[in-house]
Image (cartoon, grey):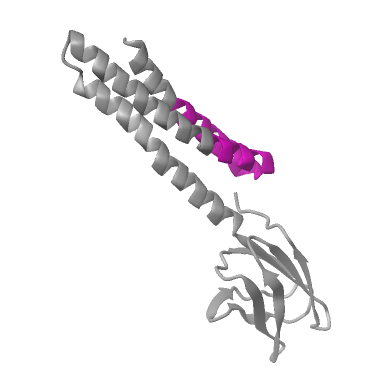
């Protein structure tokens, strides 16, 4: 196999395999250094894409002197080089979506059921299931707007409302504790507990 053709394949496969490895390792860990490694891989991958196109061009020019270039080989190399772009975009979009998942945990220590639980961000409402006494439930939400998220609910036929997140930007988590007397305590954290 021609060395220029081999180099074009290496230029396409290296960032693709490295990117998949980084993303697969990031999914269970959410490690910051892996996010940085992913950004570097995209930058290096773009340089390798240009090199790969150049090497493929040299291969085509060189092989034309000896024989007719293989369309199948050219198509394989070009496909591997080009597939890096949708792969990178998919990884960026998926990582962004996951990082914006917010976790809400409600612990009901009261003797009353909590019903009609709603979280509102601007004009969008999200429902939370009713919670019986002495139960704890966690749910994951993808709030799409930066800013405050409000809550409302019914406890012992009494309407309660307040602020769940004072300012939500990205994935966060909140623990809502309903005390025995029906009062509500909210503790907010800057990073969410992801569902995977």
Where does residue 44 sit, x and y in percent of width and height? 52, 32
Where does residue 35 sit, x and y in percent of width and height? 62, 42
Q: Is residue 194 left or right of residue 21?
A: right
Q: Is residue 45 left or right of residue 187?
A: left
Range of residues picked out in magenta: 13-41
**Along the viewing direction, whichever of 182 and 62 lies nearer the viewer:** 62
Where does residue 164 sit, x and y in percent of width and height? 70, 75
Q: Residue furthest left?
A: 68
Circle count:
0
Q: Where's the N terminus, which quadrant?
A: top left
Relative height, residue 98 to residue 186 (above, below): above
**Residue 122 in which image quadrant:** bottom right
**Residue 12 in which image quadrant:** top left
**Residue 154 in which image quadrant:** bottom right
Q: Is residue 12 visible?
A: no
Residue 35: say if magenta: yes
Q: Is residue 83 left or right of residue 190?
A: left
- Secondary structure of the magenta portion, mostly? helix
Residue 167: say if magenta: no
Where does residue 139 sit, x and y in percent of width and height? 62, 64
**Along the viewing direction, whichever of 124 and 45 lies nearer the viewer:** 45
Relative height, residue 102 to residue 87 (above, below): below
Q: Residue at x 73, y 60 (%)?
A: 190
Q: Residue at x 52, y 37 (%)?
A: 43
Relative height, residue 121 to residue 34 (above, below): below
Relative height, residue 25 to residue 159 (above, below): above
**Along the viewing direction, whichever of 166 and 60 lies nearer the viewer:** 60
Q: Is residue 130 visible?
A: yes
Q: Residue at x 55, y 78 (%)?
A: 125
Q: Residue at x 61, y 36 (%)?
A: 37
């Amino acid at each position: 196999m021609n060395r220029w053709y081999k180099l074009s394949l290496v230029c396409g496969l290296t960032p693709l395999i490295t990117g998949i490895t980084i993303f697969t390792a990031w999914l269970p860990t959410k490690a910051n250094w892996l996010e940085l490694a992913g950004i570097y891989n995209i930058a290096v991958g773009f340089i390798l894409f240009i090199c790969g196109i150049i090497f493929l061009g040299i291969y085509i020019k060189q092989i034309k002197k000896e024989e007719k270039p293989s369309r199948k080989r050219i198509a394989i190399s070009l496909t591997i080089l080009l597939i890096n772009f949708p792969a990178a975009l998919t990884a960026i979009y998926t990582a962004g979506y996951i990082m914006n998942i917010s976790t809400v945990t409600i612990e009901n220590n009261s003797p009353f059921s909590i019903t009609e639980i709603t979280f509102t961000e601007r004009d969008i409402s999200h429902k939370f299931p009713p919670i019986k006494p002495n139960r704890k439930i966690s749910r994951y939400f993808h709030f799409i707007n930066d800013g405050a998220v409000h809550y409302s609910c019914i406890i012992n036929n009494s309407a309660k409302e307040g602020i769940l997140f004072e300012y939500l930007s990205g994935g966060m988590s909140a623990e809502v504790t309903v005390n025995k007397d029906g009062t509500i305590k909210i503790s907010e954290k800057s990073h969410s507990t992801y569902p995977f």
